[in-house]
Image (cartoon, helix red, strand yellow):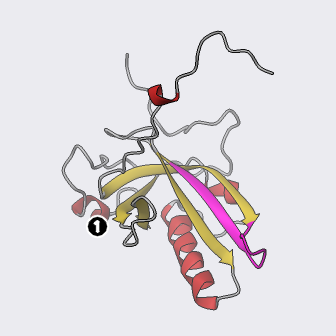
Amino acid sequence: MARLDETFVAEDHPDEFELLPAGVYLLQVTESEIADNKAGTGKILKITLEIVEGEFAGRFLWERLNIRHPTPQAQAIALKQLAKLANAVGVPNFDDTEELHYKPVIARVGIRKDKSGEYRDQNVIQGYEAVGTPSAVANAPAQSEAPKAQPEPQQQASTPTGGGAPWRKKKAA
């Protein structure tokens, strides 16, 4: 038994997940892992991305890519999305997904509507572009939703331990 110092009231902690507005965001990969799919017939690459700038800084998005799947089309779609991410962060060849971590990337984010009404609508990453790509800036929505263009990050062989993004400037207090 675990005794709390106070009474926990569930209604004080509602599960009100708000979707991000569709738009263009500056992100970085913060976590990645490979897991078996539910059927045990393939592998899923789970990627966690953090918004690093603007009104929604600190919010997260997730990708689940079927990198090994019995359906060739499902696997091809996932590998193309992974290739877009890898190219956009400047790491087109890698053997460990950690090489993609903490590198800035522009993502076009949309909203997938659940037509069945069984599930909530959800954000979906529609594509990736390198920071500073003219088309990423041109397609950006209103400034409150769009990231500012950033200079190209320095190429680094690895990310220093301790997490965080070495290219990101600290905000003045």
Tell me which residue sits at (28%, 64%) in the image: 134
Q: Residue at x 26, y 48 (%)?
A: 145
Location of residue 79 in the rendering, given as x and y in whole percent from the top left corner:
60, 77
Q: Nearer the viewer, residue 152 or 101?
A: 101
Q: Is residue 41 magenta?
A: yes
Name the image quarter holding the N terminus.
top right
Above or below for 149 versus 74: above
Q: Nearer the viewer, residue 126 or 116?
A: 116
Q: Please name the amino acid that badge 1 sits on.
A: Ser
- 101 drawn magenta: no
Mark 1: which secondary structure?
A: helix
User: Badge 1 is on which residue?
Assistant: 135
Q: Residues within 10 Å of mark 1 (few under 14, many from 20)?
A: few
- On the rendered structure, is 27 left or right of 103? left
Can the viewer see residue 129 in this picture? no
Region of the chain picked out in magenta, as a range: 36-49
Instruction: Give the quadrant of residue 144.
Output: top left
